[in-house]
Image (tube, rainbow, N blue to C red):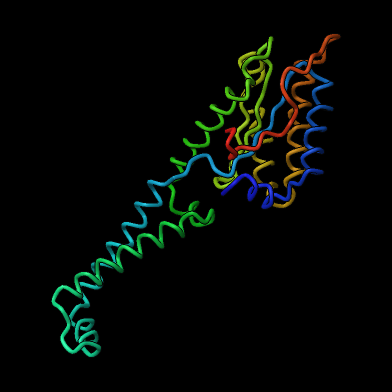
């Protein structure tokens, strides 16, 4: 899935994107903390699992054709004056290969991908991608280590909220869990509103623990980070 397809599925157009950006800006005015939001089509390609599943279906197809050869070969011979000995073997191999290719392509549909990829693999991929995004977006470079990342991965339907050590030293991870759960639950119904609410909820926690100071520079871009493009 491309970044463009992701935005279309989540119904995030330029107006919605501006709304999210403005919400981040407004919330940050009340706290010395910094908030970044990133959305990704998926946290991994999961090609290994897709191909492995395709090969399994291909092997099952190949085996079934061999077991049914006594019925298949006579049916084929009706269409040939003299069927070459190698034809059935070539046909069986060819069909099995096409099945593997078809299933591999089919598993790229998010709904199917979610079913065949193990939960542990999805969790590990989301954690790894969230962490890499945290650093690549420069959220770890604030002066007071007061940045947080709200990371949304569409295919896995998971949300992770990562906080830099300045915030993590005062606020337990559990404080972000309910916000992440609510965002994941409401993402499909109204992604823009769900993201804005998550930003506001995070802002309330930050405002209580990291109130805005007289000098409150905006250290991180408020623009929604959309993963999946060439930049990322």
Percent x, y of residue 130: 56, 31
The residue positioned farthest toward the right in the image shown: 214
Quarter of the image for the C terminus: give it.
Answer: top right
Relative to 185, is 214 above or below? above
Percent x, y of residue 164: 62, 18
Left-right relation of 1 to 77: right
Residue depicted at 60% across the width and 40% down the height:
40
Q: How many marks?
A: 0
The quadrant in which residue 103 appears is bottom left
Left-right relation of 142 to 13: left
Residue depicted at 69% across the width and 16% down the height:
146
Residue depicted at 23% across the width and 81% down the height:
72
Percent x, y of residue 171: 66, 20
The quadrant in which residue 229 appears is top right
Residue 157 or residue 21, whichever sits in front: 21
Percent x, y of residue 183: 68, 41
The residue positioned farthest toward the left in the image shown: 85
Relative to 86, is 194 above or below? above
Residue depicted at 69% across the width and 51% down the height:
8
Left-right relation of 81 to 3: left
Relative to 63, is 171 above or below? above
């Amino acid at each position: 899935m491309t970044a463009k397809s992701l935005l279309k599925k989540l119904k995030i157009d330029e107006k919605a994107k501006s709304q999210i950006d403005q919400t981040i800006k407004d919330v940050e005015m009340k706290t010395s903390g910094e908030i970044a939001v990133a959305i990704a089509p998926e946290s991994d390609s999961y090609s290994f699992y897709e191909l492995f599943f395709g090969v399994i279906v291909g092997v099952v197809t190949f085996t079934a054709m061999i077991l049914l050869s006594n019925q298949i070969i006579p049916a084929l011979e009706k269409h040939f004056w003299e069927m070459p000995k190698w034809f059935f073997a070539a046909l069986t191999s060819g069909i099995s290969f096409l099945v593997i290719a078809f299933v591999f392509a089919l598993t790229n549909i998010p709904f199917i991908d979610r079913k065949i990829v193990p939960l542990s693999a999805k969790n590990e991929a989301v954690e790894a991608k969230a962490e890499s995004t945290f650093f690549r977006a420069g959220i770890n470079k604030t002066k007071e280590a007061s940045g947080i990342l709200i990371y949304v991965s569409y295919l896995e339907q998971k949300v992770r909220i990562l906080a830099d050590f300045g915030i993590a030293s005062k606020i337990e991870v559990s404080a972000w869990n309910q916000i992440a759960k609510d965002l994941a639950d409401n993402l499909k119904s109204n992604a823009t509103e769900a993201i804005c609410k998550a930003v506001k909820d995070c802002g309330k926690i930050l405002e209580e623990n990291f109130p805005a100071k007289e000098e409150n520079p905006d250290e991180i871009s408020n623009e929604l980070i959309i993963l999946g493009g060439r930049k990322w």
